[in-house]
Image (cartoon, helix red, strand yellow):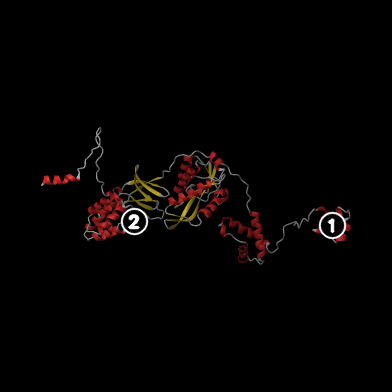
Amino acid sequence: MQIYEDVRRSVLVEGKSVSEVSREYSLNWRTVKKMTEEPVPPGYRREGERSRPVLGPYREEIAKILKEDENAPAKQRHTGRRVFERLRDEFGYKGGSTQVRAYVSELKARAKEAFVPLVSIAGYAEADFKESVVEIAGVRVKAHTFVQVLPHSGVWFCRCYPKENAESFADGHIAAFDFFGGVPLRCTYDNAAYSVKRGSGSIKGRTRTLTDSFSELKSAFLFEADFAAPRKGNEKGSVERRIGVIRSRLFVPVPKADSWEELNRMLLARAEAAKGSLELFKEDSAALLPPRSYRPESLRSAKVDKLSLVRYDNCFYSVPTRHVGRSLLVRGGPFEVEILDGKEILARHARLYEPGRISTELAHYLDLLELKPRAVARALPVVQAKLPPEFEAYHKRVEDGTGAGDRRYVGVLRLLTEFGIQPVKEALALALSSKFIEPADVRLLVLRQTEGPRPAPSLPMSTPHGHGPVVVERVPLSEYGSLMAVGA
């Protein structure tokens, strides 16, 4: 760099000729002339594409391989080394790997997509699901977390569900709108099957046909829906980035809760704390649509089979046995399933998601067990009730092989509908320590424990209106002798 400066100074400042400076510094006169024309060294300038005599015939194959990679998973695409190995093994390439890897890097750099910087609009939202592992009641399970973000202010909301489906999608929106205090003007989504109807082939363009459940949700809250192009997560980058932050901050270490409800209360408290510190949320709030009262009503008709079970999404739920053979309505939510006869709710069950699972309630089968008491030993509703050991001990004590003991056991199970598990359990413990075996005796023991000692009646001690208090004079002890003599 010093020689470059000295040459330029000699010609441009001191007025020396190009030939003279060329001889002085032993440089070609053309080089000296270029130095006077460029203020700094221009560096090497390639005038044309570099020739690749060995690699040249294989460039089309390399471009074809990289073109096929566009439809492959991101982690299963060709590296420069793998392209070289294919050229060598499949096409007879005789050169080295360095040229191939350099050319692959050059092509990938040319193919990189450019993006336009965008601004966030107040009142717009983005939503998506993510998967994480949580611990519910001591069991590690997969949680599907609905996340909705207002990119303008950065306010976010998340809620966990056992499964990602239309019910959790709708419930997540309703909970998020309550949290925001309003409804976003527009929300951007990916192309999930519970929001976009599937046709033949892959999704192309920007036209979408919405599912009935999502159309109802949009109609109820009047927000607009926008969908990202397939495999274009950058079109909803705010929620994608927020999902990463939520996973690292709220789900590390693995969160533990006794129920899904408790877990979601914990997440809501964290979201509330974050919302209060974001000033731009005022602008988002001013742009939101007013909230509306709406609960999705996804009702299906189902027939009760001979086991008094109703099928819903490949799982089975019990109803009282008097409804066998009838058609009832089933309303499924993300956490609960309700079975209705008209407007009357016959049963509520925690929702199951593993196909073939059965959920029963003991009270639904007591009428039938009274008619078929011998079935009580292996009855699924009794097993799923997970009764305390006192119940099984009582059953063994009264069982006599004739069915009379089973009828007594069913009579005790009937007490559960009247008093609950804990009082009956305590009464059975007393019955087992004595000679009581009849259900009527157990019921009396339950009543004795639940009622407790009765308070003694108290009489009013006040005097009648208008009268003073009663005064009793004490007789002197000296007069007791005379009284005793008179008595004798």
What kind of residue is marked 1? Val
Q: Going by the picture, which residue comes out furthest to the front?
A: 478
What kind of residue is marked 2? Gln
Q: Is the residue marked by circle 1 packed among few (<14), some (14-19), or many (20+) residues within 10 Å?
A: many
**Residue drawn at (67%, 64%) of the image:** 98
**Residue drawn at (63%, 50%) of the image:** 114
Q: Secondary structure at mark 2?
A: helix
Q: Quadrant of the N terminus?
A: bottom right
Q: Quadrant of residue 479?
A: top left
**Residue drawn at (58%, 44%) of the image:** 120
Q: Is the residue marked by circle 2 packed among few (<14), some (14-19), or many (20+) residues within 10 Å?
A: few
Given residues 428 and 32, the one toward you in this image is 428
Residue 388 x/y as whole percent: 32, 57
Residue 368 x/y as whole percent: 27, 52
Counting the numbered discs, the total is 2
Above or below residue 483? Residue 1 is below
Q: Disc 1 designates what residue?
A: 7
Q: Going by the picture, which residue comes out furthest to the top?
A: 466
Given residues 377 and 397, the one toward you in this image is 397
Residue 303 x/y as whole percent: 34, 48
Given residues 63 and 355, the one toward you in this image is 355
Which mark identifies residue 384?
A: 2
Above or below residue 130? Residue 281 is above
Q: Is residue 375 visible?
A: no
Q: Is residue 449 left or right of residue 216?
A: left
Residue 453 x/y as whole percent: 26, 49
Q: Is residue 316 visible?
A: yes
Q: CA distance from mark 1 to mark 2?
A: 96 Å
